[in-house]
Image (cartoon, rainbow, N blue to C red):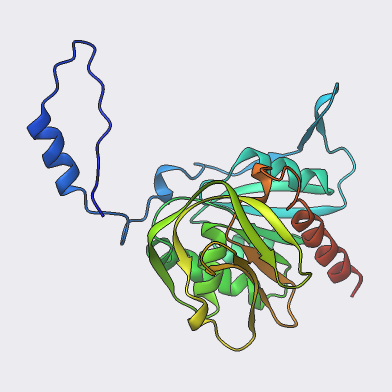
Amino acid sequence: MPNGVIAHAKNGAFDLHGLKEEAREWPGLEGMDLVPMVTSAQRFDWDETPWVWEQGFGRQTAPEFKVVAIDYGIKRNILRLLAGVGCQITVVPATTSADDILAMKPDGVFLSNGPGDPAETGKYAVPVIQQVIHSGTPTFGICLGHQMLGLAVGAKTKKMHQGHHGANHPVKDETTGKVEITSMNHGFAVDQATLPKGATQTHISLFDGSNCGIALDGKPVFSVQYHPEASPGPRDSHYLFQRFADLMRANKRA
């Protein structure tokens, strides 16, 4: 696939040869860990809830759950929707250890979206995710978090030929039969053919049949490839945040 460069010059004078060389020499995303460029430098708390007509954004003042969100490039509206289902959220940098995360005694752990090759970021993120899963803590991943959860359970990821981008991607939830209109922005995918026993495919793309969600059998752990917070449906996928809350509630009662 050809690469391109977008350039701007006020005077209209472009070094076309240099720009072509820049595009030609770009190494691609495979093997690139881009998370250090976007993760937070230090932990912080979040309590802002989703926007409501004629009220604006609110605050979660009576949280039911304590959630640690690992920031691989997290989006604000994910945090808002988590707060909206009763979560008090602490966002931590991508390199935070599992011991530090579990020491906060969270009711749940969230694995965020982010850029780059999941296999490369997974070199330090996957062992953390594996320890979180082993602890029995309910876990929910989106996009890069989904891909690295797949790696953590023994699946493989692959670079897609074109990737999925845009806000009109139909995805089927195979656990309910429901079809959602979703937003996607990813160039890698979990290879469903490599999913091990105990990891069930829960969502598929109706464009190309690629994997869009997994859940671990008998464990409160699941993830999706798309962006439920981006609201292209507009609220087709918001149930996933409630699903996470339900898992945390059930785990607390167990």
Q: Does residue 250 appear anywhere in the picture? A: yes
Quarter occupied by residue 139: bottom right
Q: Position of residue 118 (x, y in %)?
A: 43, 62
Above or below, comparing residue 158 to residue 50 in the picture = below
Outermost bottom residue: 197
Is residue 234 shown left or right of residue 171?
Answer: right
Outermost top residue: 11
Q: Position of residue 114 (x, y in %)?
A: 49, 50
- The one nearer the camera, 72 or 132, is 72
- The one nearer the camera, 15 or 179, is 179
Which residue occupies 68% across, 65% down?
Answer: 172
Total numbered labels placed on residues in the image: 0
Outermost front residue: 207
Is residue 156 shown left or right of residue 21?
Answer: right
Which residue occupies 84% across, 38% down?
Answer: 60
Q: Quadrant of the N terminus?
A: bottom left
Is residue 189 shown left or right of residue 129?
Answer: left
Which residue occupies 87% across, 67% down?
Answer: 252
Q: Does residue 105 appear anywhere in the picture? A: no
- The one nearer the camera, 133 or 154, is 154
Q: Quadrant of the C terminus?
A: bottom right
Above or below, comparing residue 139 to residue 201 in the picture = above
Quarter occupied by residue 132: bottom right
- The one nearer the camera, 163 or 248, is 163
Which residue occupies 27% across, 54% down?
Answer: 28
